[in-house]
Amino acid sequence: MDVTELAWITIKSSDVNAVVNALELENIHQGRFGDFEDKTNTFVFSAQHDWIIIIHQWNRRGGYKEYLNTMQQVVTELSQKFGEAQSFAAYEDMTCYGIRWEEYCHYTHWILARNGVLLRSFAKYDGDDLFRSFGEVTEAESFLNWKARDVWVRMPEVIRVSQQWSTEPIFSNHPGDIMGVLGYKHLQQK
C-alpha cells in the first residue's frame, strides 16, 4: 500500500514573515520544498494574487475528528489575523486489487474562515465513518452530489475547490524550485 499525503493552508496575504510568526514555527530557515528534513514539517511560500501557501506535514495525535477540530481552530485564528484562511488535505491510499491499482481517498477536508469566523468545513474519513459538512455549500463545491452521504471526494476534487477559493500548490504554484521558509510546528490538538 502506498499513501500519498498532501495538506496545505492558504492565507490571503503577501507577508510571508507575518505568516511564519503567526504559525509560531521553530527551526526557521530559508530553503526549498524538497529540503524537508527531520526538523522541518512546514514550508511557507508566496503564491500568485497575494496568497501565501503553507504545505505541512504536521504530526496528528488522536483521530481524524480531533485533527479536523484542530485545523478548524488554526484556520479560524489565522483568518482573524489575516482576513481569510483556508485549509485543504487529501490523504490517498493506493490499494492493489488483482492486477490493477484502485485509488480511494482515506481522508479529505477543506475549511474556509474569514475574519475569525468559520464559514465552511467539509471532511470525510473512510476509517471511522467521519462525515462532516458545516456551513453553506459554496459555488466552488456545487459540482459534487451533496444529496448522498457517500459523496466521493479525492485529491482532484480537493484541488478543484482550492483553485476556486484561492490557489493551490500543485498546478498553479508548484513549489519545486521556489525559495521559501522552512520550519517546524508543534500542532496542539484540541
Image (tube, rainbow, N blue to C red):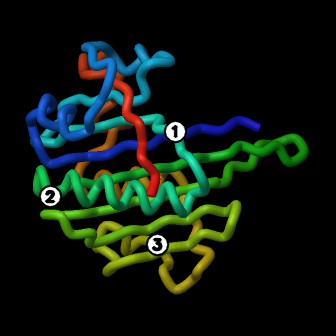
For the residue labelled by badge 2, is the local secondary structure a helix, a strand or a loop? Answer: helix
Q: Residues within 10 Å of mark 2 (few under 14, many from 20)?
A: some
User: Of callouts 1 and 3, which one flags the residue occurring earlier in the amino acid sequence?
Assistant: 1
Kind of residue sitting beneath label 2: Gln
Residue wearing tag 3: 144
Between disc 1 and disc 3, the foreground one is: 1
**Direction from residue 172 to residue 96 in the image, left or right:** right
Q: Position of residue 154 (x, y in %)?
A: 55, 55
At 37% across and 33% down in the image, what residue appears? 185
Residue 168 visible here: yes
**Direction from residue 135 to residue 83 in the image, left or right:** left
* Residue toward you, 190 or 57: 190
User: Of callouts 3 and 2, which one flags the residue occurring earlier in the amino acid sequence?
Assistant: 2
**Direction from residue 187 to residue 22 in the image, left or right:** left
Residue 47 visible here: no
* Residue toward you, 77 or 42: 77
* Residue toward you, 180 or 142: 180
Q: Residues within 10 Å of mark 3 (few under 14, many from 20)?
A: few
Q: Position of residue 23 (x, y in %)?
A: 26, 38
User: Of callouts 2 and 1, which one flags the residue occurring earlier in the amino acid sequence?
Assistant: 1
At 12% across and 51% down in the image, what residue appears? 81
Tell me the CA gap for discs 3 and 2. Answer: 29 Å
For the residue labelled by badge 1, is the local secondary structure a helix, a strand or a loop? Answer: loop
Residue wearing tag 1: 59
